[in-house]
């Protein structure tokens, strides 16, 4: 593995829950970045160590599927004050783990705010309860009186997580390019005021994964470059987006939640059944999936500006994801089976022959044009930097490492979101593992080069209206 990145010396024990593609990818980094000896790192995973990667690294694996009834009994003997729980699992409640870590004095970080298994696909629950908005509000309610104590960072991977740091840096970049004098923002109100000053109306998490394999997708198989179960779980949640104050057209199938911060809305259809127009510099215009993600809500909430109790500024924020081509074919097949997941699943890693993951934030509305800022990671770069990775997993690893270093430098911060942590620390650690990190301006809008073969009802005075570029 290439010797790069900021390091800290961690003296405690570390427990890693989940050993899928991201868990396998991050394990070697934990040993190096944190100065851990293998005997101080333990993995808890339902299927043990099928790949042999943990054994290769000298890491003990405890084969256990955590649930509401056994998670305390399994984890409590492994954790104490000053230890660290890194949660990369699915269907294991993030809130339950955070409560346990707080009681034991252990640090915590995850990449997704997960409920116990079954909540995502329980038709008896209202859509709002199955949303990321609902999960976030439960987490925020828990932390109301917990602004200090052992640090726990929720949803700190690539996206959500790293992209919140990219948004802040992108705002600073645009301000510098326009010679706008700003004081370094010190609060979320300062960041919101800067975004408002720069006339940012919309932010996409704009991602295009072009990694391909010589082994084509088979019938009845779901292929992806990261967790199949994680992708399908979030994709079958209702489509969600932070809702900007500039929006003038209400989607016919949209609803507000009726509680909480009110920074987001949801649509009565799954995210992987909802497409949106977006743009990245290398791909150009594309149709992405409006998959529910925590950052769509937290970024919109943290970039909300109020005066006299009224919201005067908030951008529309959402994910616009075009996964690898085989994942798109997998989704098409799955949709045709009424959203029933295929029995066979495959994560592409060693068999990838070419391609990259172009992951960044697309800021729209400023008169200078759209601005994309993010990571272009090729499969060749990922393999040169670290074993057991593809381009997608290494971007997640970068966000995780950045978050963990911040936790260890800020051990008494209580429960926080990615938008509340120092973006410079995250980028300092993550940048060496993100390939080419660049910012590109463009003249794209959702109305540019639209075909005139079919009539469309479009608001040409303001191209940044959600309804004008949504493709249902």
Image: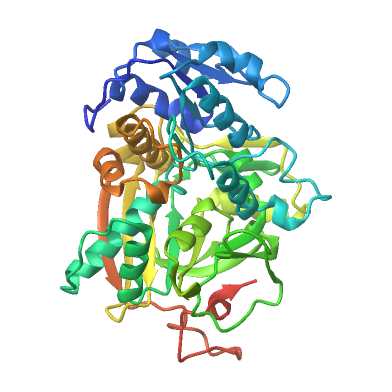
Give the camera-side residue of 185 and 380: 185
Where is 190 relative to 328, above or below? Answer: below
On the image, the x and y values in percent for residue 252 come to 70, 77
Where is 408 relative to 469, above or below? Answer: above
Relative horizontal placement of residue 156, taking residue 297 as reference (left or right): left
Where is 365 relative to 162, above or below? Answer: below
The structure residue drawn at horizontal position 48% and vertical position 90%, both measured from the top left corner, is 460
Where is 4 relative to 75, above or below? Answer: below
The structure residue drawn at horizontal position 33% and vertical position 46%, both measured from the top left corner, is 377
The structure residue drawn at horizontal position 22% and vertical position 69%, both measured from the top left corner, is 175
- Whether residue 357 appears in this view of the structure is no
On the image, the x and y values in percent for residue 406 come to 33, 36
Q: Quadrant of residue 469?
A: bottom right
Q: Residue furthest right?
A: 124
Q: Quadrant of residue 199?
A: bottom left
Q: Quadrant of the N terminus?
A: top left
Relative horizontal placement of residue 4, taking residue 11 as reference (left or right): left
On the image, the x and y values in percent for residue 289 come to 57, 60
Give the camera-side residue of 330 and 448: 448
The structure residue drawn at horizontal position 49% and vertical position 43%, both measured from the top left corner, is 155
Label count reads: 0
- Whether residue 106 appears in this view of the structure is yes
On the image, the x and y values in percent for residue 152 come to 46, 34
Relative horizontal placement of residue 328, taking residue 167 as reference (left or right): right
């Amino acid at each position: 593995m290439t010797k790069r990145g900021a390091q800290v010396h961690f003296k405690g024990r570390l427990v890693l829950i989940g050993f899928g593609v991201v868990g396998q990818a991050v394990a070697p980094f934990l040993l190096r970045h944190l100065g851990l000896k293998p005997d101080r790192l333990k993995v808890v995973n339902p299927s043990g160590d099928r790949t042999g990667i943990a054994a290769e690294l000298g890491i003990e694996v405890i084969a256990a599927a955590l649930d509401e009834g056994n998670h305390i009994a399994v984890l409590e003997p492994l954790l104490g004050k000053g230890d660290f729980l890194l949660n990369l699992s699915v269907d294991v409640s993030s809130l339950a783990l955070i409560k346990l870590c707080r009681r034991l004095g252990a640090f915590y970080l995850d990449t997704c705010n997960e409920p116990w298994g079954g909540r995502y696909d329980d038709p008896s629950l209202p859509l709002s309860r199955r949303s990321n908005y609902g999960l976030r509000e439960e987490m925020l309610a828990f932390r109301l009186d917990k602004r200090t104590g052992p640090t726990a960072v929720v949803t700190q991977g690539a996206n959500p997580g790293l992209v919140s740091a990219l948004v802040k840096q992108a705002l600073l970049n645009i301000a510098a390019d326009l010679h706008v004098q700003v004081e370094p923002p010190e609060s979320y109100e300062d960041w919101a005021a800067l975004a408002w000053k720069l006339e940012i109306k919309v932010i996409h998490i704009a991602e295009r994964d072009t990694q391909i394999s010589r082994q084509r997708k088979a019938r009845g198989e779901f292929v992806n470059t990261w967790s199949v179960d994680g992708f399908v779980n979030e994709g079958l949640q209702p489509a969600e987006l932070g809702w900007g104050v500039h929006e003038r057209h209400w989607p016919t199938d949209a609803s507000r939640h009726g509680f909480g911060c009110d920074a987001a809305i949801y649509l009565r259809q799954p995210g992987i059944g909802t497409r949106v127009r977006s743009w990245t510099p290398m791909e150009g215009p594309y149709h992405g999936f409006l998959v529910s993600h925590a950052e769509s809500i937290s970024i919109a909430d943290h970039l909300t500006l109020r005066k006299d109790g009224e919201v005067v500024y908030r951008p529309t924020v959402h994910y616009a994801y075009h996964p690898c081509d085989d994942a798109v074919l997998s989704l098409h097949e799955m949709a045709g089976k009424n959203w029933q997941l295929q029995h066979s699943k495959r994560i592409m890693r060693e068999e990838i022959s070419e391609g990259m993951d172009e992951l960044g934030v697309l800021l729209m509305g400023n008169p200078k044009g759209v601005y994309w800022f993010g990571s272009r990671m090729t499969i060749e770069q990922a393999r040169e930097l670290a074993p057991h990775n593809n381009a997608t997993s290494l971007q997640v690893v970068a966000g995780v490492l950045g978050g963990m270093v911040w936790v260890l430098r800020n051990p008494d911060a209580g429960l926080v979101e990615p938008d509340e942590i120092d973006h410079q620390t995250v980028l300092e650690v993550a940048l060496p593992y993100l390939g080419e990190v660049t910012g590109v301006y463009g003249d794209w809008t959702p109305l540019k080069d639209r075909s005139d073969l079919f009539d469309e009802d479009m608001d040409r005075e303001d191209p940044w209206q959600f309804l004008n570029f949504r493709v249902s």
